[in-house]
Image (cartoon, rainbow, N blue to C red):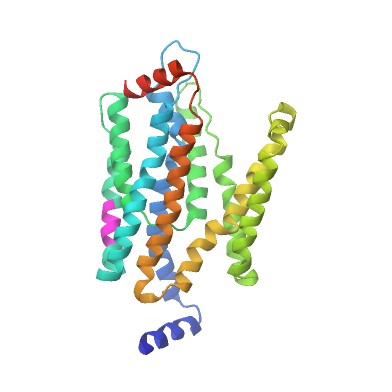
Amino acid sequence: MAGEQRVLNALDAAKPQSYHFTTIIISGMGFFTDAYDMFCISLVTKLLGRIYYHVDGAENLGSLPPIVSVAVNGVALCGTLAGQLFFRWLGDKLGRKKVYDMTLMLMVVCSIGYELSFGRTPQSVMSTLCFFRFWLGVGIVFDMQGFRISVGGVFAIIVPSAFKIMFEASSYEVDTLRSTVSVPGHWFTLAFIDKMGREICHPMGFFFMTVFMFEMVIPYDHWTHNDNRIGFVITYLLTFFFANFGPNATTFVIPTQIFPARLRSTCRGISTASRKLSAIVGSFGFLYLARNKDKSRQMQGTLQSLG
């Protein structure tokens, strides 16, 4: 134990070398691709609705039924919950490098599978998509979120623009503002976390998130008026900014510093799984709370989901 501590102290005291940057790039790119595959789905769910649930002649361009939308977005969270607990524990048993390679292969196979999304009907395509996204979530390791958000937003802008130039067809607008606004928060964390300290950034982010959420909720009727929409959007974006200039970054940093090395992977898995559990409750719970109160409309949406 003492020898291991001496090695860690030597690494901490060493000046930045090419080895450090090589390690950051190699491990970071794995995290980047994981996070990109995990989160880019939120930018294309509208397009999935237009492609697979559009009815010719209907005024509505088509959208995913609520059950399908939540399943597509939330099923990977369920896989992540299981994967974090299992693979993080396995990392302390077999070694993190071996488990990293295992999850990398799982991610590659499932990424190819869900991007192909084979099937003859919308229901079969969505089922295939959800199946592979679940197993993708099992192998997911989160990090480099600022980079994946920016790249996801850039691709969401470039790809539709390219199709608009190449093909004469009406374009479908995808709102990337909510996603791309998170990027400055991560960069602010990168710039100030060592100067301000983790202990300040962490509660500061929670504090301002709470302030802006109350600002949106308490005078909600005020924000429903069309003239006040700009103020609502600004408040909404500030909530995301401080989420990433705070807990959405520090919760990845603090565990690596406070957990003992021999149990670090397992403990990190438990803490990450706790976050995913709350995300699952929010995703599926919101579907229940936002359901249409009209029973006939609920049944219509369910039948549409099942085909």
Residue 10 seen by the camera: yes
Q: Residue at x 42, y 26 (%)?
A: 65
Q: Position of residue 77 (x, y in %)?
A: 39, 47
Q: Position of residue 267 (x, y in %)?
A: 39, 66
Which one is in front, 50 or 279?
A: 279
Total number of numbered labels? 0
Q: Residue at x 32, y 54 (%)?
A: 83
Q: Position of residue 252 (x, y in %)?
A: 48, 62
Q: Quadrant of the N terminus?
A: bottom left
Left or right, 7 with respect to 289, comes to left
154 above or below 14? above
Q: Quadrant of the C terminus?
A: top left
* Magenta extent: 101-106
Is the magenta region chiefly helix, strand or loop? helix
119 above or below 158? above
Q: Residue at x 36, y 72 (%)?
A: 263
170 above or below 139? above
Does residue 179 show up magenta in the picture? no
Residue 54 seen by the camera: no
Left or right, 212 with respect to 123, comes to right
29 above or below 259? above
Q: Position of residue 51 (x, y in %)?
A: 40, 25
Q: Residue at x 65, y 56 (%)?
A: 207
Left or right, 221 with respect to 11, comes to right
Does residue 105 show up magenta in the picture? yes
